[in-house]
Image: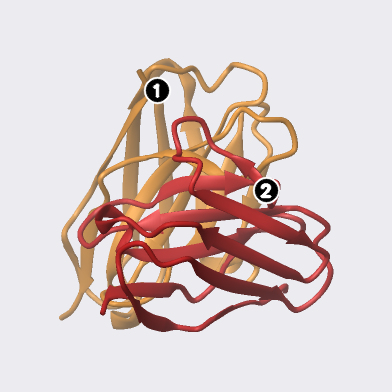
Amino acid sequence: QITLKESGPTLVKPTQTLTLTCTFSGFSLSTSGVGVGWIRQPPGKALEWLALIYWDDDKRYSPSLKSRLTITKDTSKNQVVLTMTNMDPVDTATYYCAHRTMIVVVDAFDIWGQGTMVTVSS
Amino acid sequence: AIRMTQSPSSFSASTGDRVTITCRASQGISSYLAWYQQKPGKAPKLLIYAASTLQSGVPSRFSGSGSGTDFTLTISCLQSEDFATYYCQQYYSSLTFGGGTKVEIK
């Protein structure tokens, strides 16, 4: 059974760097085809994809946020970490991590974490 | 960047109705499209990928069609548990979600 859980601060100040950790079980990020992504959702708004890391350490970022994002993996700890710099109140959102489906050539997310709400405020 | 536009943004329907949601891509994406369902306070659930392939465990009343720029999600007979917000997502070039379509009870 695959599970994912996000953790990190619930409140950050403007200009600070946000660090979120996704801890997962039921799969290994060293297995061919596996990927973990981050998606966020501001209150009452749509989903926005942020980043995706694959088993081979290939990394993809949202073009609009690429300069602010870094995604890394720690295979031994079954964790994926997302950092976002220069946080702003508009970054207030629920942040989800999700498992990329194992279906070849399909970058969709079949298992999601419960999400973690991050508020940016001074 | 590819933009995904969903229509309508919301609508009301009754149990038993056949409903269709549309998603349009700003450029051709072949069949690289997924659909998700999201209920309030919950994470999204993958319904369909590759435009028309049903994810395992998803009821057969859900179906998807389209290729290129125009796609549809159809629910053949709306059930009470289907009232939710639906999102399309392209994965042809980078990843982009649509703005969502909320299906409300009439």
Q: What's the distance in space between the residues labelled 2 and 1, CA to CA?
A: 32 Å
Up the image or down, B33 lies above or below A122; here it is above
Eye-nearest disc, 2 or 1: 2
The residue lying toward the viewer, choosing from B62 and B53, is: B62
* Quarter in which the C terminus of chain B is drawn: bottom left
Q: Is residue A62 visible?
A: no
Question: Which quadrant would residue B77 be assigned to in this image?
Answer: bottom left
Q: Residue A1 at x, y = what percent?
A: 35, 18
Residue type for callout 2: Ser
**Colour representing chain A:** orange
Question: Which quadrant would residue B58 be assigned to in this image?
Answer: top left
Q: Residue B66 at x, y = what percent?
A: 75, 61
Which label was assigned to residue B42?
none
Query: On the same chain: label 2 and label 1?
Result: no
Q: Which residue is mark 1?
A: A78
Q: Which residue is mark 2?
A: B52
Residue type for callout 1: Asn
Q: Which chain is red?
A: B
The residue lying toward the viewer, choosing from B45 and B104, is: B104
User: How busy is the neighbourhood of tag 2: few (under 14 within 10 Å), some, or many (20 plus)?
Assistant: many
Residue at the (54%, 70%) spot, across then down: B20
Q: Is residue B22 visible?
A: yes
Up the image or down, A8 lies above or below A33; here it is below
Residue at the (81%, 74%) spot, across then down: B27
Q: Residue A53 at x, y = what percent?
A: 58, 40
Would residue A19 appear left or right of B31 to someone viewing this image?
left
Element at badge 1? loop
- Chain letter of disc 1 in the image: A
Q: Residue B62 at x, y = what percent?
A: 51, 50
Q: How many marks?
A: 2
